[in-house]
Amino acid sequence: MEKWLVAAKRADFKKIAETFGIDQVTARLIRNREVVGDEAIQVYLHGDRRNLYSPWLMKDMEKIVSILAEKIQEKKRIRVIGDYDVDGVMSTYILYQGLKGAGAEVDYVIPHRMTDGYGINEHLIEQAWEEKTDAIITCDNGIAASRQIERAKELGITVLVTDHHEVPFEENEGKRQEILPPADAIVNPKQADCNYPFTGLCGAGVALKVMDALYQQMQLEEDITDLMLEYAAIATIGDVMELVGENRIIVKEGLKKLHHTTNLGLQELIRVNGLEPEQISPYHIGFVVGPCLNATGRLDTAKRALKLLCAKNREEAAILAGDLKNLNDSRKEMTAQGVEKAIELVENSELINDKVLVVYLPECHESLAGIIAGRIRERYHKPAFVLTKAEEGVKGSGRSIDSYSMYEKLCECSQYLTKFGGHPMAAGLSLEEENVEPFRKKLNECSGLSEQDFIEKVMIDIPMPINYINKKLIQEMSVLEPFGRGNEKPVFAQKGLQIQNPRVFGKNRNVVKMRLADTAGYSMDAVYFGDGDQFLEEIKGKNDLSVVYYPEINSYQGRDTLQIIIRHYQ
């Protein structure tokens, strides 16, 4: 079930259109994305590297940079400790290459998902000490590692934290008190007393800022931001950060660099997936390239992804890229099997009536639980947890809907959990096997959800007749790119369209092509991606169709035609 809503944001669209030389439709789309005021619109439309904030505005930036410069000068051994997802891999690469370029004696370690778990741990600290590491710099982790960092300090290791995750806190007499690790410097824009104007950077974005400041401090000629922008862009999209403010500039400018990448590993990874560097968009990073980089951390070790980025010759890059693609293909197959099993369990048991779905798949690879939970959430539009059997007890991941704060609800059921963490939309947890059923029951008892919460809301930018669409408008809308979370692709709607000559294509019968005509007889090509046979069944005998769509130009054999892509229909 869906509820269609129109974004009714107000502004002087005529004035915005005249000031910036754009169509009023484009002006409305910009307002719908909460971009308000001439300066903000100017940056949104034409922002580039000059609009990025100074790294020196971040708390502890001077401290971290002076410590790093000193360690480099004294030839002390520095170790980067990252994380096993795409953001962790990219931020590790940025710090490793940046420090190496500044003359540091540097190496890196990426924790293993299964044996080490997330982020810095005591085993990695003992290992660093045994290998005579003088300083550890974290990326995409470390803000919540107080105990582990305390151990490093006991061993005399300098610890520098760069992270973007929420800062842990405790409530004291109604006031939040941050719990910061005892590191020598902490760079994280989410710290309460950090004055940096943008808190939405990913781990790689923060790492890039640190390297930018270091190169300025050491007066190095290399433009490190220019060199590393494409990696920060991949991480920003891969970590599903909001494409607003600085993130949008990082992605926009980073994609330009990626289209002409000189990195052999990325070139080969793009090639092995049947793509060309020039055509890489946020979609390709989110659904093709990013998952290949992530697959190593899920099914093997993320060190392979980093090796790919550091590959010195094309032969090595091609072999590693092939390995990553094969791993991702295995991951896709395993995910599909897991999703099928989960749906079967939900449909054929009392779970179908639950408001919060808790699906226990003992045999499932624990690294796939989050992806499967996301698919289950999409299918039923309910919060979903997928649990798997681990070495000790049961581990799992959850994905939520807007009206359900997952982390808060886990706090209410914490008596059944041995470990948990997360935020409103996603969470990770561990528990004993005998607590799976009591946990499921308790979650459902205190869900606070009503049937209204399970109705998916479809936000429409503008109700717009198809006869208003033209090539110039579609081309102009490209200024809104890159699209992604927080800067979604625009969607329009029209009622009462007549369907002409619908035909189903594709080996999975998942493409429907047709023409749609308005009451005046104006018609246009339309395409729907989904269950083709179900679509034909639902429109049988109907005279009109209401659609939510976005327009595009279809270029075929040198000829351009207008068409709409149907996202939702009634």
Image: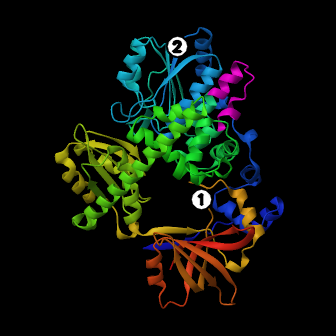
- Residue 560 versus residue 260 in the image, above or below: below
Bounds of the magenta segment: 211-229
- Residue at 63% x, 52% y is 281
Q: Which residue is mark 2?
A: 77
Q: Which residue is mark 1?
A: 488
Considering the whole magenta stretch, tell me its main secondary structure: helix
- Residue at 70% x, 45% y is 256
Element on which disc 1 rests: loop
- Residue 251 versus residue 28 in the image, above or below: above
- Residue at 59% x, 46% y is 270
Q: Can you give x and y, in whole percent of width and height, for residue 42 in the image?
A: 77, 52
Earlier sequence position, callout 1 versus callout 2: 2
Q: Is residue 562 magenta?
A: no
Indicate the quadrant containing the N terminus: top left, top right, bottom left or bottom right: bottom left
Element on which disc 2 rests: strand
Within 10 Å of the Cα at label 2, are there few (<14), some (14-19), or many (20+) other Cα atoms? some
